[in-house]
Amino acid sequence: DGGITQSPKYLFRKEGQNVTLSCEQNLNHDAMYWYRQDPGQGLRLIYYSQIVNDFQKGDIAEGYSVSREKKESFPLTVTSAQKNPTAFYLCASRRGPSGANVLTFGAGSRLTVL
Amino acid sequence: AQKVTQAQTEISVVEKEDVTLDCVYETRDTTYYLFWYKQPPSGELVFLIRRNSFDEQNEISGRYSWNFQKSTSSFNFTITASQVVDSAVYFCALTEVGNYGGSQGNLIFGKGTKLSVKP
């Protein structure tokens, strides 16, 4: 079955360390997205990519970086510059960038900074 | 600017009760889409429904129904005869695809309503 795989599901990091969250999809979707979810805050867009080798900042991109070298993969790096990285991170994809297209989500990665 | 408001932060009901989750949106655009997603405790958001701004017909799917009213900018979600498995966080979301939407089509999410259904 097609879907989105995020790994790891749980991750602990010491302050000052960079960490990379993996997102892989086999849906043949062009567009991919990273969201951050904090309790009671809904979902906020970090970065998105509409085609391979191209990506744009979302609403809260500071302290994060991404790459899109392959259509299937859109990893997110949480850098030491991110002041409050403890959160639940969700990766999503959709067929194309049109707002009419439905987003498919992965199961999420929970990052805790110790 | 575009905005989605889910005023109910948490709702608790007893199984078999009916419950309505409210969603009010703001948009400058005449062409837009509205969505509802369910997030169970496992964390993954599951798509429930999409409605475009030109289709105000109410939708019913089993125990779920949606009431879209442009006059009040609302897209409310009702669960009839709720079950424990309905316990989740429910998100309403909006994208603008007309003159103000641009090419990105990014979703704006409400903050979600946590529904707890007790046996």
Image (spheres, coloured by chain):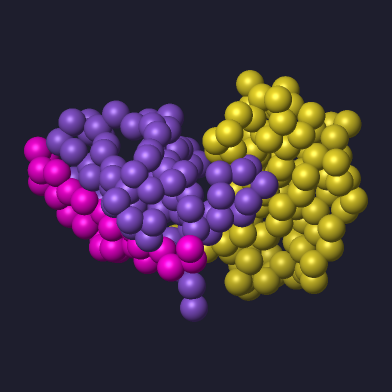
Chain colours: A purple, B yellow
Q: Is residue B18 left or right of residue A106?
A: right
Residue B2: image x %, image y %? 64, 27
Q: For residue B62, what is the image quadrant?
A: bottom right
Q: Is residue B15 left or right of residue B109?
A: right
Q: Is residue B75 left or right of residue A88?
A: right
Point 71% across, 44% down: residue:
B34
Which residue occupies the foreground of this view, B46 or B100?
B100
Point 43% across, 46% down: residue:
A51
Residue B59: image x %, image y %? 84, 58
Q: Which residues fall within the magenta stretch?
A: A5-28
Residue A55: image x %, image y %? 38, 38
Point 86% across, 46% down: residue:
B55
The answer to whether residue B3 shows anywhere in this view is: no
The answer to whether residue B117 shows anywhere in this view is: yes
Magenta span contains residue A6: yes
Question: How many numbered markers are drawn?
Answer: 0
**Looking at the image, which residue sits at the far bottom?**
A1
Residue B104 lies, with reference to residue B44, above or below; the image says above
Residue B64 lies, with reference to residue A58, above or below; the image says below
Magenta span contains residue A53: no
Residue A4: image x %, image y %? 43, 64
Point 21% across, 51% down: residue:
A20
Q: Is residue A81 left or right of residue A66?
A: left
Q: For residue A24, what is the image quadrant?
A: bottom left
